[in-house]
């Protein structure tokens, strides 16, 4: 149904094909706070990009669009949302299966990241839209996600437009979850609990890591997860999360098996839940490492109050690890989540963001020495009393001895 010369509504399309749309009031809230921030920074439009459901979640946040594998770009402005996606010349990128809202322009071009001579196609359409509206200041969001060809063409072609990096602005907005978003986070965590509950019925001596992973992935698919990663690793002393391609070990009696389930629940919100399983009675060293990891996770989570700095939590974690004879963390052991599997704030010394109430994060410090390695993974939400653990699964080293 045409609402204006260039504005389209997809409300009349087959919305039943996408069952997990974000509530309209929530989308209006996101648009409102984002457009207010854009006005404060005098940004006319944001340039967004999406080609997967693991990273690049800001486009989902502002469009409610479940991007397929083929790439889609967006301009988000005060006037609405302009879509440029893969498809026919002169076609419409946004079909009924995408169910986007507040669409201003809906354009398809035969762009593919593997075909170099199409590099400028999306950017050419972006430039036409920006010129048509007379926008003079554009903000890129996710500089490491936006294709270099799009960035290069836009910045070289629009000499009269000022370009800025608006990623930090959007990170601050996305990091604090609304009550509606927290309800989605709760549902995502419950989904993880249900799938993890099946592990004792699947995990057996003689099976490969991949067989265990595939069974859990199948459950996730059956439960309408938008995307998923299941990391499974078996080892006699130091289990770690192997990616799918490397899950080729055969599980032996006496092994410890680490299983990390990372799922984007229906609608796209990520959570993660990880536990370690002992194929037989655990050693004293493994039990101690596990108990220390759980204690460290809970103690660090208690520090996560509004105003706390993630870097301080990170440094305290490493101080505790070193004092107990464990290897220090050189990566990070906690991070935000949302429509990205890893989002800000990241608990590392470089993170400038301070914690705010209703930030949602995953925590997973690891206690590793020469005798054992243990890691427990749970989701939390920042409260005035510290991080509240959302997952209800007991923080136990599970023994499977049959």
Image: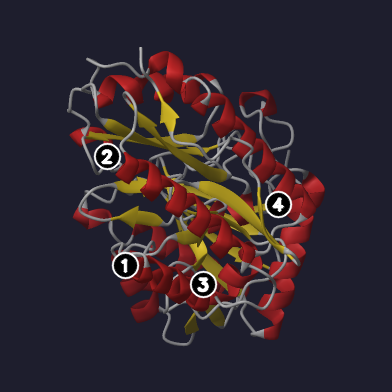
Dividing the image into 4 quarters, which one contains the C terminus? top left
Q: Callout 2: helix, strand or loop?
A: loop
The residue tagged 2 is 243
Q: Position of residue 271 (x, y in %)?
A: 54, 44
Q: Callout 3: helix, strand or loop?
A: helix
Marked residue nearer the N-terminal end (1 or 3): 3
Q: Is residue 393 above or below residue 17?
A: below
Q: Which mark is residue 102?
A: 4
Q: Nearer the viewer, mark 2 or mark 3?
A: 3
Marks 1/3 in contact by CB < 8 Å: the verdict is no
Q: Which mark is residue 313?
A: 3
Marked residue nearer the N-terminal end (4 or 1): 4
Q: Is residue 49 above or below residue 66?
A: below
Q: CA distance from mark 4 to mark 3?
A: 41 Å
Q: CA distance from mark 1 to mark 2?
A: 23 Å
Marked residue nearer the N-terminal end (4 or 3): 4
Q: Nearer the viewer, mark 1 or mark 2?
A: 1
Please state if 246 lies on the left or on the right of 390 as rendered: left
Q: Callout 4: helix, strand or loop?
A: loop
Q: Nearer the viewer, mark 2 or mark 4?
A: 2
Q: CA distance from mark 1 to mark 3?
A: 13 Å
Q: Which mark is residue 328?
A: 1
Q: Residues within 10 Å of mark 1 (few under 14, many from 20)?
A: some
């Amino acid at each position: 149904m045409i609402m204006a010369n260039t504005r389209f509504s997809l409300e009349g399309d087959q919305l039943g094909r996408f069952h997990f749309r974000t509530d309209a009031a929530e989308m209006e809230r996101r648009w409102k706070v984002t457009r207010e921030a854009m006005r404060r920074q005098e940004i006319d439009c944001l340039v967004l990009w999406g080609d997967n459901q693991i990273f690049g979640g800001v486009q989902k946040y502002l469009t409610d669009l479940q991007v397929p594998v083929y790439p889609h770009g967006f301009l988000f402005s005060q006037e609405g949302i302009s879509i440029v996606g893969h498809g026919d010349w002169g076609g419409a990128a946004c079909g009924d299966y995408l169910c986007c809202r507040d669409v201003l322009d809906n354009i398809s071009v035969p762009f593919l990241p593997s075909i170099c001579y199409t590099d400028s196609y999306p950017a050419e359409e972006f430039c036409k839209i920006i010129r048509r509206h007379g926008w003079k200041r554009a903000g890129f969001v996710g500089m490491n996600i936006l294709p270099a060809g799009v960035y290069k063409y836009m910045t070289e072609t629009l000499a009269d437009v000022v370009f800025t990096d608006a990623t930090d602005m959007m990170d601050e907005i996305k990091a604090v979850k609304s009550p509606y978003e927290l309800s989605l986070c709760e549902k995502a965590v419950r989904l993880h609990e249900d799938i993890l509950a099946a592990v004792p019925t699947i995990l057996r001596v003689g099976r490969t890591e991949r067989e265990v992973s595939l069974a859990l992935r199948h459950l996730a698919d059956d439960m309408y997860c938008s995307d998923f990663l299941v990391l499974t690793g078996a080892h006699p002393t130091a289990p770690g999360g192997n990616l799918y391609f490397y899950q080729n070990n055969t599980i032996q009696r006496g092994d410890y098996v680490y299983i990390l389930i990372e799922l984007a629940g229906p609608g796209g919100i990520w959570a993660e839940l990880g536990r370690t399983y002992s194929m037989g009675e655990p050693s004293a060293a493994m039990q101690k490492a596990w108990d220390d990891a759980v204690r460290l996770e809970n103690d660090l989570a208690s520090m996560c109050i509004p105003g706390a700095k993630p870097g301080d939590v990170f440094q305290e974690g490493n101080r505790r690890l070193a004092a107990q004879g464990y290897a220090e963390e050189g990566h990070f052991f906690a991070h935000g989540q949302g429509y990205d599997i890893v989002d800000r704030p990241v608990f590392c010394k470089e993170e400038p963001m301070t914690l705010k109430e209703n930030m949602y994060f995953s925590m997973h410090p690891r206690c590793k020495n020469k005798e054992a390695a243990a890691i427990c993974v749970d989701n939390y939400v920042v409260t005035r009393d510290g991080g509240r653990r959302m997952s209800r699964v007991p923080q136990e080293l599970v023994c499977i001895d049959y």
